[in-house]
Image: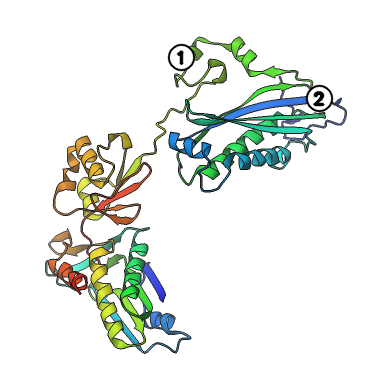
Amino acid sequence: MTLTHLNARGEAHMVDVADKPESRREARARGRIRMQPATLALLAEGGLPKGDVLATARIAGIQAAKRTHELIPLCHALALSKVTLDFELDSTQNCVWVEAFCRLNGRTGVEMEALTAVSVACLTLYDMCKAVDKAMIIDGVQLEEKRGGRSGDFSRQATEVRHAAPADASPLMPGDGPAQDETPVVLVRDEAPLVSVRFLAELRERLGEEQTELDPAQLTAGNIAGVKRALMAADPRYALLAEGRVLAARNQVMATDDTPVAPGDEIAFFPPVTGG
Amino acid sequence: MQIDIRVQQAAFDAATMQQRLTAGRRDIGALVSFTGLVRDINERPDVEALTLEHFPGMTEPALETIARDAGARWPLTGVGVVHRVGRLTPGDPIVLVMVTSAHRRAAFEACDFIMDRLKTRAPFWKKEHTASGDYWVSERQSDHDDAGRWERA
């Protein structure tokens, strides 16, 4: 196996394809963007502030496939004969699956075009939805199959059956879809964005801590008072929050005990102000 | 209404702020300015220096809100606020509030109001350094009483 984009001296170069015979080339790639169930519901009902999310992501993916050669240094510019983007809203895994299919009659494969289309469509979905959900995760971008060309056909499903190893029998994210769709996932994280908590001035010095994070699941009440209680329950040091007058700000605006707190918020606690 | 808010370590110059608030205008009849200085006697005598901490990201919007609240109560043409942060020594100017209006009463009252609000609502904290040690300055009831005057009015 050699890397065709490296020449005899190991330098990157563009492969000369003038003498390769033309043939029908096809590639299918897939990826997904995971999001909060509420974000997915908004997307499904067209309630997001930037408008028709899927139509925009589809156009973005098609445009990206056509411009792959401008992004990937040693890729040829291809006259694609067909590019399609399909989206599947998956409410069991809380994600949007993105699938791109590219075809042309030519001398080079179109898998880079399909992968670029999936990536840019996912980025566009992120952009369209980020106003309501910044913790979305793009992952699982992969080539599913390709046909044509000297290197022959490829199918992930067939490959993974062949390569099935004992380690793959215990996926890190159980219940995350059919086994043949899964490459091992190394990133495991809670999808709910955390509440970040900051301490300022004397409070910071007495706690010996500038900031911490709180899993929204730990909140008994979704407000500032709930954040205080959750901190005090987690560590007796935070009893300081109940001593004397402690002020709070939510996302840099003065708040009271009743101010609502949402995942992703920044909550700051500080002593009474003494400027001027 | 023109609003000019600055939070900075460097010293400020009231004449420069005056220039910014009055340049090219002929409708201003009054300019009132307050400058606060660092004292050497506070909770303890012999204050050698103080360190001013603030909450970047919140401080400027908080000061702007105070300026807008003043603009909603009095007919003002401009509000300028400069607050210094970092280490300061007695005698150093620490805060400047400058208000312009067509008439003096509005400018006097708005300047007073802005300082009262600033002392009770803007996220600044003073730590004083004295011969007998460092301490964080406590809030004063008198500042809350002063700010309370504007709520009753």
Please state, as top left, top right, bottom left or bottom right, where the C terminus of chain B lies in the image.
bottom left
Q: How is the image coloured?
A: rainbow
Q: Residue at x 40, y 73 (%)?
A: B4
Amino acid residing under circle 2: Arg
- Residue B109 is left or right of residue A240, and the answer is right
Which chain does the numbered disc 2 sit on? A
Q: Residue at x 59, y 39 (%)?
A: A54
* Disc 1/disc 2 C-alpha distance (Å): 38 Å
Task: Tell which of A181 and B10 is nearer to you.
Answer: A181
Expressed as whole percent of the image width and height from the top left, the position of residue B5 reads 38, 70
Q: Are marks 1 and 2 in contact (CB under 8 Å)?
A: no
Expressed as whole percent of the image width and height from the top left, the position of residue A202 reads 21, 54
Q: Secondary structure at mark 2?
A: strand
- Residue A215 visible in rendering: no
Q: Label 1, on which residue?
A: A170
Work out which residue is located at the far front of the displayed protein and give it. A45
Quarter of the image for residue A140 reads top right
Quarter of the image for residue B136 reads bottom left
| Position of B100 relative to A41 (above/below) | below
| Position of A231 relative to A27 (above/below) | below
Q: Secondary structure at mark 1?
A: loop
Q: Label 2, on which residue?
A: A24
**Mark 1 vs mark 2: which is more N-terminal?**
2
Which chain does the numbered disc 1 sit on? A
| Position of A78 relative to B22 (above/below) | above
Residues behind callouts 1 and 2 on a single chain: yes
Please state, as top left, top right, bottom left or bottom right, where the N terminus of chain B lies in the image.
bottom left
Crowd around label 2: few <14 · some 14–19 · many ≥20 (10 Å): some
